Structures are given as C-alpha cells and as structure tokens.
Amino acid sequence: MIAGTVQYGGVGVGAGGVIGAVSAGMNPMTPAAAKGVVFQHAVMLGGCAAVFGATEGMLDGMFGPSLKNKVAAGAASGALLGLKSKSLSGAAFGAGMFAMLQFSWGIGKESYDDGFFR
C-alpha cells in the first residue's frame, strides 16, 4: 500500500509540475510567481494521486482487487480535487467525475482483456 501511494504521488507531482509549468508559461508573470504556480499544481495533483493510491491499496488489501476499489479511490481523489473550490458541490462533482472516469476505464480495460475488442 505504501509503495503504491508513493508511486502514484510521485507521478502526480511530476504531472502537476508539468501542468503548472505550462500554465505559468502561458501567462506573463515574474519567476517567483511562476515557481508558486508550478509548486501549487504539483502539490495538489500529487496529493490527489497519493490519496488515490492509498485508498486503492487499502481497499485492495481489505477486499481484494476489484473495479469497485478503483471507483471508490477515484471518488476520494476527485472529492479532494473538488474541495479546492471550497464548496461541497464542487467536491461532489469532482468525486462523481473521477469515479465515472475510473469506472469507464475499468470497464474498457476488462472488455479489452476479455478479447471483446480484439
């Protein structure tokens, strides 16, 4: 569980840093402000990815690997990302969107693995 959390968190920090760098590069700002934008994106996406990894690892350990675990982990990380808007409706929207994304990805992967799309 810890290894998955660290792995997901590290990838999230890297992806958030890239997104922050692109965002900072598209807007004129001082170098100090650009560092702040990159850091903010990296921390937020890294935290969401770590929450996803920890939730998925914990549920996999308790109930065994399942698509339900990925959906619940997606909802937890989406809620965290939605809370950035400081509203309950934003958290609910983020949870729903990330849960739906994980469900769609899981169904597609299972269909592909079963040979449906080959």
Image: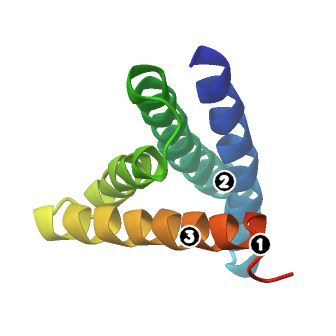
Q: Depth check: 45 or 33 in front?
A: 45
Residues at circles 2 and 3 in contact by the CB criterion of under 8 Å: no
Snapshot quadrant of residue 114? bottom right
Residue farthest to the right, as pictured: 118
Q: Do we see residue 30 in this rendering?
A: no
Quick check: 28 above or below 51? Answer: below
Residue holding disc 2: 16
Residue farthest to the top, as pictured: 2
Residue at image position (49%, 44%) is 66
- Name the image colouring: rainbow
Q: Mark 3 or mark 1: which is in front? A: 3
Q: Mark 2 or mark 3: which is in front? A: 3
Quick check: 55 above or below 69? Answer: above
Left or right side of 73 for 25: right
Q: Position of residue 60 (x, y in %)?
A: 48, 29
**Mark pair 1, 2: CA separation:** 14 Å
**Mark pair 3, 1: CA separation:** 37 Å
Q: Which mark is residue 107?
A: 3
Q: Residues within 10 Å of mark 2 (few under 14, many from 20)?
A: many
Q: Is mark 2 on a helix, strand or loop?
A: helix
Left or right side of 15 for 100: left
Quarter holding the N terminus is top right
